[in-house]
Image: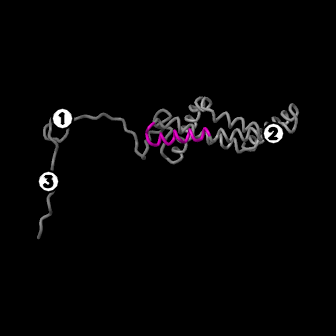
Amino acid sequence: MALRYFAVYALLEIAAFVAMAVTLGFGWAVLISIAAGVLGFLTLRWQGRKVFGELRRAANNEVDARAPLADTALVATSTILLVIPGVVSTVAGILLLFPPTRKVLRPVVVAVGARRMATAMDRAGLYATGIYGGGIRGGRVPGGGTVVDGTVVESDTPGSGFGPASPPMTTTPQLPPTR
């Protein structure tokens, strides 16, 4: 499956470069490819500082951490796209660096992250999909217990130690007798 994705990506990058070379000339296509990479790295440097500053503020509980965490994931993806050679990946990486694009993609990143976390917890035996996916699966709860339906009844009998009418039961520890 990964080989198919790579083949599609390679064909897309080659087609984009050939289209630029035919339209503008080979020299301009190479120059645009290099310029796109340089522009991408400059944008990464500029936006990376902002995102990691927000992440630092979130670590200090100055702002809500959800947006900086999602932005960090998007900047990491953008970095990978900028490092991969090719005009299409560079343009996609640059687009991921702009704040409006990141704002639109944040819910997607959060949903994918939550799903991956739930899957990882499920594999670890913590049954995350039961908790986050609507109901407890198979009557199991995190920690290995079993769900038992029941009703809690408080006793009003004096001296039972339970209920609002009785004082708490206290016992004084006794030492064993000495011989």
Q: CA distance from mark 2 to mark 1?
A: 82 Å
**SS for tag 3?**
loop
Q: Which residue is mark 1?
A: 164
Quadrant where the C terminus is found in the figure: bottom left
Amino acid at circle 2: Leu
How many residues crowd mark 2 within 10 Å: few (<14), some (14–19), many (20+)? few
Task: Examine the structure image and report whether residue 51 is included in the region drawn in magenta.
Answer: yes
Q: CA distance from mark 1 to mark 3?
A: 22 Å
Identify the main secondary structure in magenta.
Answer: helix
**SS for tag 2?**
helix
Q: In the visual, does 149 lie left or right of 104?
A: left
Report x, y in % for residue 64.
47, 35
First-in-chain label (3 vs 2): 2
Q: Quadrant of residue 77?
A: top right
**SS for tag 1?**
loop
Q: In the visual, does 2 lie left or right of 166?
A: right
Report x, y in % for residue 93.
68, 37
Amino acid at circle 1: Pro
Q: Which residue is mark 3?
A: 172
* Magenta range: 46-62
Q: Which residue is mark 2?
A: 31
Amino acid at circle 3: Thr
Foreground residue among 131 and 108: 108
Residue at x 12% of width, y 68% of height: 178
Residue at x 67% of width, y 40% of height: 42
Foreground residue among 113 and 20: 20
Q: CA distance from mark 3 to mark 2?
A: 87 Å
